Structures are given as structure tokens and as C-alpha cells.
Image (cartoon, helix red, strand yellow):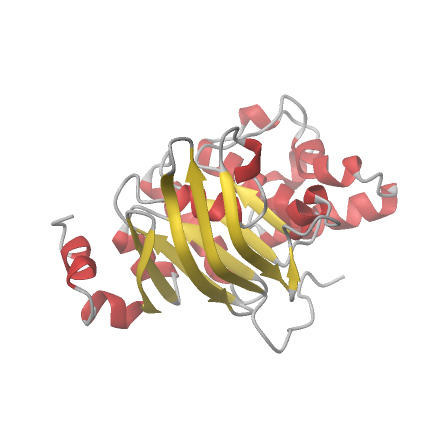
Amino acid sequence: MSGAAPVPSGPVVAVEKLSVTARGNRKLLDGIDLDFAPRSLTAIVGPSGCGKTTFVRSLNRMTELTPGLRIDGRVLYLGQNIYGRSVNPVVVRRRMGMVFQRPTVFPMSVFENAAFGLRLVRASEDEVDSAVTEALQRAGLWEEVRANLDGPALALSGGQQQRLCIARALAVRPRVLLLDEPTSALDPAATQRVEATLQRLKEEIVLILVTHNVAQAARVSDRIAFLHSGRLVEVGATGEILERPREPLTMQFITGRV
């Protein structure tokens, strides 16, 4: 079964006036509006503490796991507000998977790591076998691990572990994959392999990538959204943002002065 889903006519994710407020009325995000089209890779960039991680965690309701935060506004997934009272956050996180800064592999085999989400939903063995194989292929890891699927995942290199985490997220066939600085702990060669994986995947699903690395955004993204102090300052095609930013704050960040 192909990992590609039918392409919707509108945005897959639409963020409307999204704000996140911490205790003491401190704004972490302030009124963000941003849409994400099918088959695209948007890089979320900005200085440390600008709200990048809070933003992506808000897109699949992980922000609400942190005590003391209030979320206002709407996040629409295929037109449905994911913060609606009747919406199950577990289902949201299946549709919008997440890969974290450091690989989070479990002390089990490569195969069972990739199958973890499928086991939680009690998929059949045939479905698990098919989905794991497909996910490992899409994550660019299959040829490296196919002969040792029963081997320990912790024996893999850091870059392989991160691609295994991507495979685990892909195995439940999300339409959106959120990535929070997924290469920051990797060496250049491993980073290049992960980036090659992302460039393949953006032809299939929506990728939203938090990165502190402007050069990485230039290499892999179609579009850049620049955040500063919890606000969306500017968004546009990658080349335009990097070469002809409209806002002085964006220029300062791109040139290393923020």
C-alpha cells in the first residue's frame, strides 16, 4: 500500500489566532495565523526562546500536556478544530506525528520500535508487517536494517535511530509530520541522510520542521516561517525569505544579528 494519501483541495493544517499563555500571563505564542498546504515542507525558524517548539507542540495537542499553559485560537486539521471537546488527542497525534530533537528509541528490536504505534492500536500481524516494511523504506532505513530487524535498536547509530523514529511515526500513516530540530544531535553525514529522507517525504505528506539552522532550511524547505518573541514576523517561499526578506527582524536573523 502506498504511503501517499489523496491530496486535499485546501490546507491540511490551518492555524487561526493561535496563542499560548503561561502562568503570569506570559505569552509564548501570540495570535499566529499560518496554513500548511499538502505535500510541502515548511521550516519554522527564529532565535532561541521565540516559541518554535511551543508552536509545533500545539499542532498535535502536546502543549496541553504541560501544566499551566492556556491555548487559545484554533488549529484546523482538514477543516476540523483539533481542540474541539469531542476530539480525541490520541487520534490527533496519530494523524500528526512528531519526531523530537534526540532519538527516542525503546530498548527493543528495530522491528518492534517501528511497530510500536501499530501495536498500541492492535493492528493485525499482516498489517504490522506491511506497514513496518513500508515505513522503513520511506524513512530511507530499510536497506541498512532489513537483515537485522530483530536486532536491538539501541545498537544503531544516532542517525539511524533518528530515521527509525521517523519510520515509527510513518508506520501509522500520518498526513503531517512535525519535526523539532531532528538533526541537532547528529553529525554532518547523519544529518545529510535525514535531510534526504525529508526531501523524499515532502512529496507525500506535510512536513513542519523546527530548525535553528538557516542553511538547513535553505537546503530542504519550500517555505520559511520566521518567529520572534512568540509572533509570526514573516512567512514566504524559502528563496524570497533568504534573499529578499520584507521585515528588518527577518534580515537581522538571516544575517546572524538576532
Q: Report whether residue 7 is seen.
A: yes
Please tell me whether residue 213 is drawn above or below residue 254 in the rendered image. Answer: above
Position of residue 210 measured from the top left corner of the image (x, y, whole percent): 40, 48
Q: Quadrant of residue 167?
A: top right
Q: Residue extending furthest top?
A: 107
Q: Quadrant of residue 34?
A: bottom left
Position of residue 3 measured from the top left corner of the image (x, y, whole percent): 68, 60
- Residue at the spot 37% in from the left edge and 34% down from the top edge: 185
Left or right of residue 153: residue 118: right
Left or right of residue 137: residue 240: left
Please tell me whether residue 242 is drawn above or below residue 143 in the rendered image. Answer: below
- Residue at the spot 49% in from the left edge and 66% down from the top edge: 35
Q: Residue extending furthest bottom?
A: 9
Q: Report whether residue 181 is seen.
A: no
Position of residue 165 measured from the top left corner of the image (x, y, whole percent): 57, 39
Q: Quadrant of residue 121?
A: top right
Left or right of residue 54: residue 108: right
Is the N terminus in the top left, top right, bottom left or bottom right quadrant?
Answer: bottom right
Position of residue 223 measured from the top left corner of the image (x, y, whole percent): 37, 66
- Residue at the spot 64% in from the left edge and 73% down from the top edge: 7
**Number of callouts:** 0
Depth check: give the residue in front, 143 or 137.
137
